[in-house]
Image: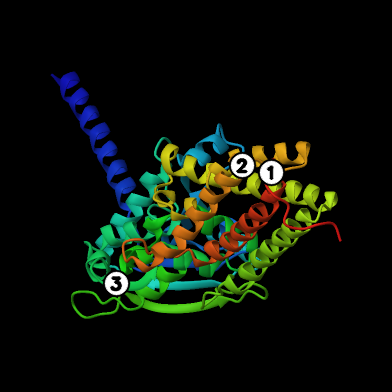
Amino acid sequence: MKLKQTFLLFIFCIALSTTRNALAQTQSSRLGPNAQVLLATIGPGALIWERFGHNGLWIRDLENGIDRVYHWGLFDFNSENFWPKFLQGYMDYSIGSLESPQFFAANMESDRDIWLQEINLNADQKNALFDFLKENDSEGKRIYRYDYYLDNCSTRVRDALDDALGGIIKKAGAEKGSGKTFRSNTRRLLQKIPLAYLGIQLGLGHPADDEISVWQDMFTPMALRRHLNEIQLPNGAPLVLSDKFIFHSSKINEPEEIRSYLSFYLPVSASLGVFFALLGYLCIVKRKLACFLLAFFGGLWSLLSGLIGTILLIIWFFTEHRFGHWNENLLQFNPLSLVLAGYFFVFLIRGRPSLLGRQLLYAVAGLSLLGLLMQIIPVFDQVNAEIIALALPAHLGLLWAMRTSGDLLPGNRKIRNNP
């Protein structure tokens, strides 16, 4: 009997010890009463993918030795099939976390603006958010399907805070118009990188021009920071307890206005159109060099236009880049120009243009002109005036040149003699 009692007492002690250890572990996993949740907002950087800013949630609990920043939107160029997936629109990004000194030192070294906002959460909300962040930053759960407008580093932070707060951020912004679009934000932030600006303007279709809500506008970290400052809790208290600017970039600041490239694209395209027209005029007075140059540069322009159009077509019909669908820029740069480039190659060899090539050019220039005329119809209101300005004058100049040089076609009467 004594042996049995001793054994039961031993089992009870083990169970009590296990329970105490589990309780201590549970207690230590909770944040202390003075713990802080801060939103760190990082301004634009020098690289293309840094132009939209970055952010992270800083959990700071000195009593329990917790001092970590959780942030999304991480990627690795060397990961398996990164580029094929990226081109198709299947982009796998991840969450990560760093000790706060590492996080801030890296961004200061990159010379990027840094703001800190303390978020007004109660103890339960802080712990719920902390548990969510730890779970997301665990093995097998870090990877997520990235979308540059709808599911990125900033929207993940927004959603995490919104869930912890019971949905008050979405309630404050989902039905409120921002007066902006995904395109307008993109143009504003990329305007100082001309090639990236042009590429995005070409690739974005009509869906990027719908007005977005304040909730959607939070896809950029800088906008998220600004909008959170305007939100109040149900009890009337501010959501943001403090907003501090802690590091100022000496080089790159967020642009406030959009700088249009229309005044640059239009003269460039018009000059190209005049150049084509001049070569067409010189062709009819039997200047072989002019005909050669017209065939060569007309072919290059058509090849470039056709390649751009083919890429736009592939984006629309064969990728998951949803904001590249329904793209009216296909009227300015379309795959028909690839066929036209072949006719210019024939022109280059034979020394005279073909009738079919000239007729195809009518179609190419006509579609470009149609894209301009469609702008007066409300349903076709894609913001692509810059792209029209870049394409249409060159197409028209080339058409005029080919119509003029068409006098070189067999059976056509020469309208001019050699000077």
Q: Nearer the viewer, residue 329 or 65?
A: 329
- The image position of residue 295, as x and y in percent, is 74, 46
**x, y percentage for residue 172?**
24, 71
Q: Name the colouring of the figure.
A: rainbow
Residue beneath disc 1: 409
Can I make out residue 61 in this image? no
First in residue order: circle 2 vs circle 1: 2
User: Which label lies toward us, 2 or 3?
Assistant: 2
- The residue that appears at 46% across and 42% down in the rendered structure is 89
Q: Are marks 2 and 1 in contact (CB under 8 Å)?
A: yes
**SS state under label 1:** loop
Element assignment for label 3: strand
**Rendered-image quadrant of the N terminus:** top left
Name the residue that disc number 3 marks: 177
CA gap, disc 2 and disc 1 = 7 Å
Q: Is residue 315 left or right of residue 2?
A: right
Residue 273 position by quadrant = bottom right
In the rendering, at what x and y percent does residue 374 appear?
A: 39, 62
The secondary element bearing badge 2 is classed as: helix
| Circle 3 Cα neighbour tier, 10 Å, few/some/many (<14 / 14–19 / ≥20) | some
Compared to residue 5, the image places residue 167 above or below, namely below
Tell me the mark number nearer the camera, choosing from 2 and 1.
1
**In the drawing, does residue 68 fall left or right of residue 411?**
left
* First reached walking from the N terminus: tag 2 or tag 3: 3
How dense is the environment of label 2, judged by Cα within 10 Å: few (below 14), some, or many (20 and up)?
A: some
